[in-house]
Image: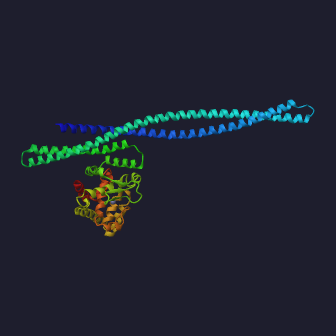
Amino acid sequence: MAAGNSISSVFDFINQVKHLYPQTASDINTKQNSLDDIHRYVEKLHAYLVDLSSRAQSILSERSRVSVLLENEESRLAQLQSRERQSSSDDDDDDDDLQSEIQEAEESIRYLRDREEELSQSFDRTMDSYNETKARRDSLTHTAAQLESDLRAKRGKCGTIATKLSQDADILGNEVQAVKRQASALHSIASMRFGASASQAAGSRSSREQELLQYESDARTHAQLYQMLAGGDNSSSAQHRQAITQRLSGASNPLARNLYNKHAASVQIENDHYEGTAHYNPSTGSINLHAGADAQNPKGAGTTYFHEVGHMIDHKSGSGGWLSSDPQYGNALKADVESHISNTMAKNNCSRAEAFDIISDELTGTENHSISDMFGSMTNGQCQGDWGHSRNYWQNDSTAFQKESFAHMFEASIGSPEKLQRIQRYFPRAYSVFESLIRRG
Ligand SMILES: [Zn+2]
């Protein structure tokens, strides 16, 4: 079958570039690092050249000053010597004065000649270092140019691979839809009692669907990884992108990652150097955050990004309203909070207020930032750890606790298995409703 063949060549390509990625990334990073080193060194050499050249200039001007002095002394000596030749020897005192003046001029000329010679040598030495340094700088500039063109070619290839991976992911996405249609056709045959073979075929279709989804997700993740190698800038935004792709390639809930991949292309960052509180703006559909800060986020790199994207997906994929506004989700969240409170009361044989204090202590620390915010949202801020929104925030929008919980669950579901485990422990019912919501999304 033609379609089967082309899918298997898509699988081969994805396997191949997945396998090549670590080597390619380390090769490009190593080359980029040595290129950066060379650039820094060339800059130092350049500063040294400027210094040497100004040193040579001042030696030259000092030498010409000495030359002028020397000429003056030489002409003074010539005058003194001609006076000496003309002089009569009747005045010994005058003669003595003249002799000492001649001696003085001769000494001064010797000194100035020595000085002139010294300066010439110093100039030559300075020019030698200048030429040596310049030759070294020129050869390094040449090496850098070669490295740069090599890197450009390699990055170009990565760009091509990224494009092909995105196209392949789309092909696989279509194939998933085709398989789903076939599966539902086979299911209806099976239900008409056409025998075990049809239902077996339907079963193998569904494992085929899993395989296709896995490859699609790999293709999308690696498309981003290769795209990053193709980009090559070193800005805070690039570090942020790297943090994001790292989380996407880490352990995730496949439902959340597939939903992210579906929406990834429509994520709009309005300002990635935003100094205020990061947020998703429902009226523009875009996000404001500080990429550099989020790359170093103490709650985990990329936490703000995936949280705000969670809000965006909640908003954009709900039909009409927000996906999280489903009352079943709200009820499950409240039930989970209530059951933790009553368990704590029973275990400690204490009042509700005391249980709030116990749980508040339990929810301190950055690792509990999401759960702390979620408990605060449902207890009017009376039961929370170190992190949370203000009471006003919860009171202004009666579904805010559902929206924030959705964003927290989404964020924890991508490349943050430890956080996810924690959320599932505190919110077992709500997380399973969350999964059914994002299956719809
Ligand atoms: Zn939020």
- Please, is residue 36 above or below residue 408 in the view? above
* Picture colour scheme: rainbow
The quadrant of the image that shows the C terminus is bottom left
> Image quarter for residue 423?
bottom left
Can you see residue 381?
Answer: no
Residue 141 shows up from this direction: yes
Vertical relation: 151 (above or below) 239: above
Image x and y of residue 259, in percent: 26, 51
310 relative to 176 in the view: left or right: right
Q: Is residue 7 left or right of residue 393?
A: left
Q: Residue 405: x percent and y percent?
A: 30, 60
Ligand 1 in which quarter:
bottom left
- Residue at the image position 86 percent from the left and 31 percent from the top: 84
Residue 210 in which image quadrant = top left
Instruction: Name above or below for residue 412 compared with residue 111.
Output: below
In the rendered image, residue 397, in percent from the top left (x then y), is placed at: 30, 66
Query: In front: 78, or 29?
Result: 78
